[in-house]
Image: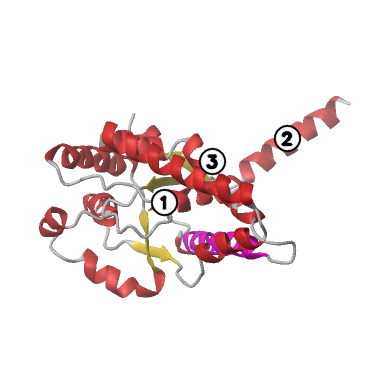
Amino acid sequence: MQKIILLLVLFTLNAVSAQPKKKQILVIGTFHFENPGLDVAKVNTFNVMTDKSQKELENITNKIKKFGPDKVFVEWNYEKQDKLDKFYNRNTDSILKKNADEIVQLALRSAKKLGHKRLFGIDYNQTNFPYDSLTKGMTEANQVGLLKSNLETMAYYENSQNEKIAKYNLTELLVDINTTKSNAENIEWYLGTANRAGKVDNFVGAYLVSEWYRRNLYMYSLIQKLTESKDNKVMVLLGAGHAAMLREFIKHDPNFEIIELATILK
């Protein structure tokens, strides 16, 4: 019996030691620093070009440098990597002073400090987001309660974000966006509201949700493919909604371990 127990212990230890070391993936969800107003929910713009915010960005990117990702992935069309490369190789000081986009202020600033030769675009744009058809489907199905709930959810999100933009500094905003509560709120609308939309034989809601999942799964596929065996750590900077989805995928991927922004800022 003792020999059997010993063999089982040795087998367990060997199995554990044989498992590959997980790669660390720093997932940073963000609001759009240069808000184009294209999202369904409309929120105010936060000025990241003030002296105070620029000092915060220096601190955040210094902490990212200390974390040391081997690659930095961004929300840029993967089919236009050549344009991203040209963009990345422009004069750093000039672009940091003129361009407020989060790709510049967070990702490019970090990658330059790390001595990286490029950023990696992973966005996939060949999907649909038929929001107008979604609300039309609710109306045609006489889903009065769902329409009301949808409007209330959007209003709550807009008011909540605008209050935080008025109250928080940049670091506080970014940490808040990446909390478990914010991640859950980003996903709940798709399954709790959108997926229910339409008559019994109208799957407009499920179609919108499936397209959202498809876009994010394709983006995650690119992260998996572009992360090489030599890469021990990577960083991903995406809009908050995308980042929330990625966290769900990573939880079930044995190859990655999520690192949160709040952790590296300590």
Residue at x 50% of width, y 48% of height = 151
* Magenta span contains residue 12: no
Mark closer to the chain start, 1 or 3: 1
Residue position marked by numbered label 1 in the rendering:
41
Determine which residue is flagged by label 3: 184
How far is mark 1 from mark 3, CA to CA? Answer: 16 Å
Three-letter amino acid code at the position of disc 3: Ala
Q: Residues within 10 Å of mark 3 (few under 14, many from 20)?
A: some
Which of discs 2 and 3 lies nearer the camera? The answer is 3
Image spot of residue 31 (x, y percent):
35, 48
* Magenta residue span: 203-224
**Residue drawn at (57%, 63%), measured in percent from left and top?**
136
- The kind of residue tagged 1 is Ala
Q: Amino acid at mark 2?
A: Leu
- The residue tagged 2 is 10
Q: Is 142 displayed left or right of 68 in the figure?
A: right
